[in-house]
């Protein structure tokens, strides 16, 4: 069983990326992250980004691509990810108006299946990244999340499991990792607590409610390829937060993942 690599979802550094993309990526590489998952390209060309990643020996995991771009610019998005060297084409969420009922979800499943088949033909893997709302509605006898993976094929649609949101939705994270064993190439490693209003408050790794050590052990057994650190909102400056999360990973002395 191979070791997992550790990457960073660049949404965490969205403000820094907008100001200084090159300097931000240099900082990420220097901290020891092996790869990055993009959430926008900030006006840079694919070749510009590829050249910088190659210089930094930083891998492109792939990108988060919204539903609008999937429908309006699918080939362009595929080409961009392939040029930067990515492997994963991930839908990060869906608009509320498209997921109000079971019929809406069924339409989404058809889109995901078709998109997954097309990106697969071109050498990429389609994934879907969850939040908590997929566990708020039933499609048939299942949560919308589970119905998605029952409706689509394993080859076309894989799981980018965000364990923070699964636990926030009051589901058992370890059960879900085991349930989708072999279908989870990407896992968002996140920690959280709840604020005074009961809303999600994301934290640096090791500071919240998620049993991350158990998650990491379960992930390697499930065949996860990438542990991807993400923090939706940071209490410290974001560059400091990603450093603290990396330090936590280093402190675990785990033999299940690779750090540079």
Image (spheres, rainbow, N blue to C red):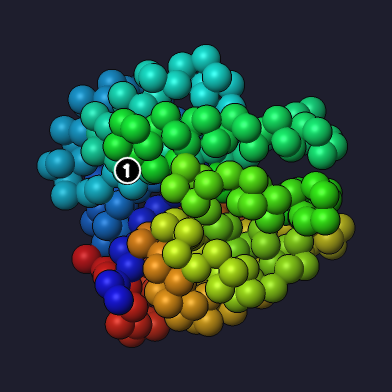
Q: Is residue 145 above or below residue 14?
A: below
Q: Nearer the viewer, residue 18 or 47?
A: 47
Q: Residue at x 63, y 62 (%)?
A: 164
Q: Quadrant of the N terminus?
A: bottom left
Query: Measured from the top left, where is residue 107 in percent x and y?
Result: 70, 30
Query: Measured from the top left, where is residue 46 in percent x and y?
Result: 27, 25
Query: Measured from the top left, where is residue 50 in percent x and y?
Result: 21, 33
Q: Residue at x 39, y 19 (%)?
A: 75
Q: Nearer the viewer, residue 45 or 24?
A: 45
Quarter assignment of residue 192: bottom right
Query: Measured from the top left, where is residue 33 in percent x and y?
Result: 30, 58
Q: Quadrant of the C terminus?
A: bottom left
Q: Using residue 159 as the reference point, say whether residue 242 is left or right of it.
A: left
Label 1: which residue? 87
Quarter assignment of residue 111: top right
Residue farthest to the top? 72
């Amino acid at each position: 069983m191979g070791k997992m690599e550790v990457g960073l979802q660049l949404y965490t550094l969205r403000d820094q990326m907008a100001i200084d993309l090159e300097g931000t990526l240099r900082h990420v590489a220097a901290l020891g992250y092996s790869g990055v998952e993009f959430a926008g390209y900030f006006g840079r060309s694919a070749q510009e980004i590829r050249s910088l990643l190659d210089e930094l020996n930083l891998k492109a995991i792939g990108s988060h691509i919204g539903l609008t771009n999937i429908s309006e610019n699918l080939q362009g998005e595929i080409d961009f990810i392939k040029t930067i060297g990515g492997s994963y084409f991930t839908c990060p969420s869906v608009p509320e108006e498209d997921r109000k009922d079971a019929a809406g979800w069924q339409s989404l499943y058809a889109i995901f299946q078709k998109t997954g088949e097309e990106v697969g033909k071109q050498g990429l893997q389609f994934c879907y990244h969850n939040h908590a709302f997929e566990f708020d509605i039933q499609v048939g006898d299942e949560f919308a999340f589970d119905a998605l993976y029952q409706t689509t094929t394993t080859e076309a649609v894989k799981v980018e499991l965000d364990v923070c949101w699964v636990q926030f939705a009051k589901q058992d994270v370890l059960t879900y990792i085991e349930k989708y064993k072999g279908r989870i190439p990407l896992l968002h490693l996140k920690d959280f607590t709840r604020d005074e209003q009961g809303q999600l408050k994301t934290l640096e790794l090791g500071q919240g409610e998620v049993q991350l050590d158990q998650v990491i052990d379960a992930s390697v057994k499930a065949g996860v390829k990438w542990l991807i650190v993400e923090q939706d909102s940071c209490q410290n400056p974001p560059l400091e937060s990603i450093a603290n999360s990396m330090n936590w990973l280093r402190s675990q002395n785990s033999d299940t993942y690779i750090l540079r």
